[in-house]
Image: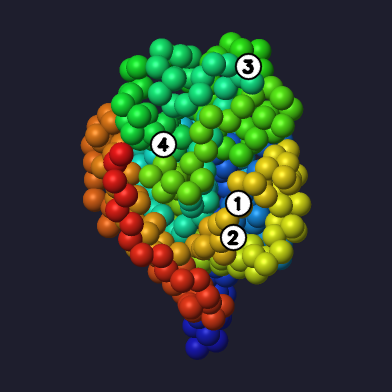
Amino acid sequence: MKSLLQSLLALMFVVSFGSSAALAEDKPAVIRMAFPGVGVGNRPFTGGNSVSTMHLRGQLEEEFRADGIKVEWTFLRGAGPATNELYANGLADFSLLGDLPSIVGRSSGLKTRILAATAIRQNTYIAVPADATIQNVKDLRGRRVAFQKGTNIQLAVNKLLEANGLGEKDLKTINMDQATARAAIITKDVDAIVGGPELLSLRDQGAAKIIYASQGDLRFMRHCSFIGSEAFIQKYPSITKRVVKQLVLAAKWLSDQEANPSPVYQIWAKSGTRFADYKEDFKGQSLKALASPLVDPYHSSQYKRQISEAKRFGLIKNAFEYEAWPDLHFLQEVLKELQLENYWTPAPALETPRT
């Protein structure tokens, strides 16, 4: 009996030790956050959305410090296409990603899931040299136009050109990241560049003029989502929920600043895009609505349309059903736990005309 008891105690120790080891291993050593872009001058900071805010405020690092989980942020000049490469090689767990690159990735077989909305209703700007004779989009026919292909800017460009009786084939398009494009417009190596509010500083420096801004024109707004690797989500659901919680808290902080957004623009300015540029870019828009993490009817309808448009413009080979893409139960649980279920108002679906 004594021998049997010793054996049972030994077995219990092994089982207990094994269970503790398994529990200890039930978390990643690192959470790999990818960001499709860099700040001005290649800075590892960006602004304009809840993911950038979560990074700038160090929320994930604080959340997982006690767990000993490291958070790695990778900022990519190659933007959306480079982010997709990380996912394809199993090197990214979460990221903000624009509508077109995430659609391209999903259509090519990348196993990602939409977890929340972020960086929705982004404006698109077109800048030309200050002394250029180009006055509008129609004047771009035959011109050298630079933008980063494979990003959500490319889809916005295609729709904008179509609305003006043009297509990419009518331009001499050049694939350039934002830093290179900004330099190229100053040296006049290109005739026009397409980008975001970072182009406004070129206007104020007298180096360029803005011939188009999408502010108020919902047809050419750009959208993003917070997405995650399906493999990571399935392996670490509790960690995924905590990541989504920090994203929601970042969105809540942004929304709470709506009456006085100066603290928001100040922290975003670490990206190198000026306070004044963010202020102008967000003028007339609700910061709370723009910060909403809700994958609401508006967000869903826009993504469904973007999938269709990407196929129509030949930017993807195969369309797919949107409904199987989002995994929103983490977001729903977090909103309930934080008592934010009714904090943001879901926006209705919007079917915008093509032209």
Quadrant including the C terminus: top left
Residue underneath mark 1: 282
Quick one: label 4 or label 1, which is nearer the N terminus?
4
Q: Nearer the viewer, residue 25 or 219?
A: 219
Badge nearest the viewer, 3 or 1 = 3
Q: Nearer the viewer, residue 232 or 307?
A: 307
Q: What is the spatial separation of the Cα atoms under label 4 and label 1, in whole angstroms?
A: 18 Å
Crowdedness near tag 3: few (<14), some (14–19) or many (≥20) residues, C-alpha within 10 Å? few
- Disc 3 + disc 1, Cβ < 8 Å: no
Three-letter amino acid code at disc 1? Answer: Phe
Q: Residue 131 shows which numbered tag?
A: 3
- Disc 1 + disc 2, Cβ < 8 Å: yes
Element under disc 1: loop
Q: What is the spatial separation of the Cα atoms under label 3 and label 4, in whole angstroms?
A: 25 Å
Give left or right: position of 113 versus 216: left
How is the protein colored in the picture?
rainbow
What's the residue at 73%, 38% (across, down)? 272
Badge nearest the viewer, 4 or 1 = 1
Q: What is the spatial separation of the Cα atoms under label 1 and label 2, in whole angstroms?
A: 7 Å
Badge nearest the viewer, 3 or 4 = 3
Give left or right: position of 318 versus 144: left
Element under disc 3: loop
Residue underneath mark 2: 287
Residue 21 % position (x, y): 57, 65
